[in-house]
Structure formats: C-alpha cells, structure tokens
Amino acid sequence: VGNGLARAKRLTSVSLNFKDTQVGDAGAAALGLGLRKSAHLSKVALDFSGTKVGDAGVGALGVALGAAAHLNSISLDFTGTLVGDAGATVLGLGLEVADQLSFVSLTFNHGPQKAHLREKVLEVLAGFSGSPKHSPTALRAQVAEW
C-alpha cells in the first residue's frame, strides 16, 4: 500500500481501515513512507485498531506524516494496539513539525496502563498545541474517552 501511495502524486486525501488485521510496526512505517511522498496530501484518516502496531510503528508513522508539507487534518485510531507512552511521545513530536496541521484526532485505549498512557498523550498534545508554529485556537485535539 505504501509504495502505491508514493506513486499517487495528486492524492490529497487518504482514509484506510486496517482494523483487526495483522499489520504491525513494519507495515505502519512503510505506509508512513508512502504517505510522506504524497506531495499534495492534506487529509489522513487511518484506523489501526486491533492491530499489532506498537511504539516503533506509530513513531515512524508520526515522523513521516509530520514531513507531509500540506497535511492539515489527521485522524488516527490505535484502540487495542501495542502503542505505549514512547510511541505516543514520538508520534506527537513527529506531528509537531507539520506547519499546516489544524485538526488532530487521536484514539487510544489500553487496559491496565490506560491512565498512564492517557497522561502521556495529553502531555504531548498540550506541548503540541502550544507550539509557536500552531495557533492554539486553530488546533483542535481530541483524545477518546477511556
């Protein structure tokens, strides 16, 4: 999928559902590289819920998406994945450099560690919305209820 997206030069919007598949870190990273090469990409919605994506995959995806020059809206669902606080942190740091980003929707849901991860995600998003590159009034960030 990532290689095909990299060749789609005029692509502006992507919505992909990988829910309950075997996609893992390598797949998420490859997808990110493909999306990074889509020069006109402005809107991304990806559902990785119930997959094997973990910290490495979500981190690579965040760094790649942050490099998308025209990205202004992103919606990512990592419910029931292996993503922890390290992945959430790298995701936020990657997205922080996306100068055009005005809407972010992130969904995480983790059993026993949910309180810790929720705090980490909120910490990253608080820093993100306070970035000098983004107007706090223009940037909306959502974290799903746990």
Image: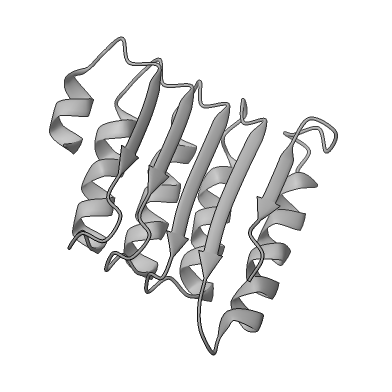
Q: Position of residue 100 (x, y in %)?
A: 61, 25
| Camera-side residue of 60 and 110 | 110
Residue located 67% across and 30% down the image: 102
**Residue 3 falls in which quadrant of the image?**
top left
- Identify which residue, 22 or 1, lies in the foreground: 22
- Residue 109 x/y as whole percent: 52, 70
Indicate the quadrant containing the N terminus: top left, top right, bottom left or bottom right: top left
Relative to 117, 28 lies left or right: left
Q: Is residue 7 above or below residue 116?
A: above
Measured along the vertical axis of the image, is residue 54 above or below residue 37? Answer: below
Apparent side of residue 146 relative to residue 52 in the rendered image (left or right): right
Q: Is residue 81 above or below residue 21?
A: below
For this orientation, the residue located farthest to the right is 137
Q: Position of residue 121 (x, y in %)?
A: 64, 65
Quadrant assignment for the C terminus: bottom right
Compared across the picture, whether 15 is left or right of 146 comes to: left
